[in-house]
Amino acid sequence: MVGEKIRELRTAQNFTLSELGQELGISHQQLQKYETGTNRLSAGMLASVARVLRVPIAELFQDAEGGTPDKRDPVTEARARCHTLIDRTSSVAKLESMAKVLRALSSD
């Protein structure tokens, strides 16, 4: 169940196996084993996955029907997607451009 949720969150945030694995410091093969349930995740790895995907740890245990509390609202989801894009950008010039666009959009 946890592995399926990680895959769902990873794809929703447009992470490839390799990209998320790199962020977590593991191989894409190891991440795939976590997602398929072949290997179990340690508590520390659960915390790392939640941090990188910007979700509460409890959300990793939420089933497909939303069977646990802590349902995220659309604003939180949109912020998480923005943060993911920003966190994956290493170019100062691109980050400055992103900041200008965000400033322009926020001055409504």
Image (cartoon, helix red, strand yellow):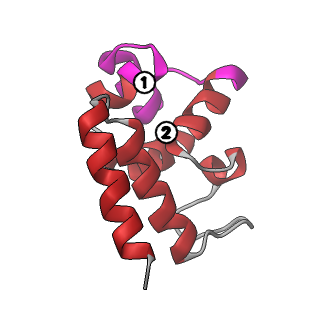
Residue 98 picture location, percent across and down: 31, 52
Residue drawn at the location 60% of the way across and 37% of the way down: 51
Residue 87 picture location, percent across and down: 42, 38
Residue at image mark 1: 23
- Crowd band around label 2 with a 10 angstrom C-alpha radius: few (<14), some (14–19), many (20+): many
Query: Dot 2: what SS?
Result: helix
The image quadrant that residue 106 belongs to is bottom left
What range is drawn magenta here? Answer: 22-44
Residue at image mark 2: 3
Residue 107 falls within the magenta-colored stretch: no
The image quadrant that residue 23 belongs to is top left
Kindly identify the amino acid type of the residue bearing the numbered disc 1.
Answer: Glu
Residue 14 picture location, percent across and down: 29, 48
Q: Which mark is residue 63?
A: none
Residue 8 appears in the rendering: yes
- Left or right of 30: which side holds 28? left
Residue drawn at the location 39% of the way across and 17% of the way down: 30
Task: State which quarter of the image contains the C terminus.
Answer: bottom left
Residue 12 appears in the rendering: no
Residue 107 position (above or below residue 52): below
Main structural element of the magenta stretch: helix, strand or loop? helix
Residue 32 falls within the magenta-colored stretch: yes
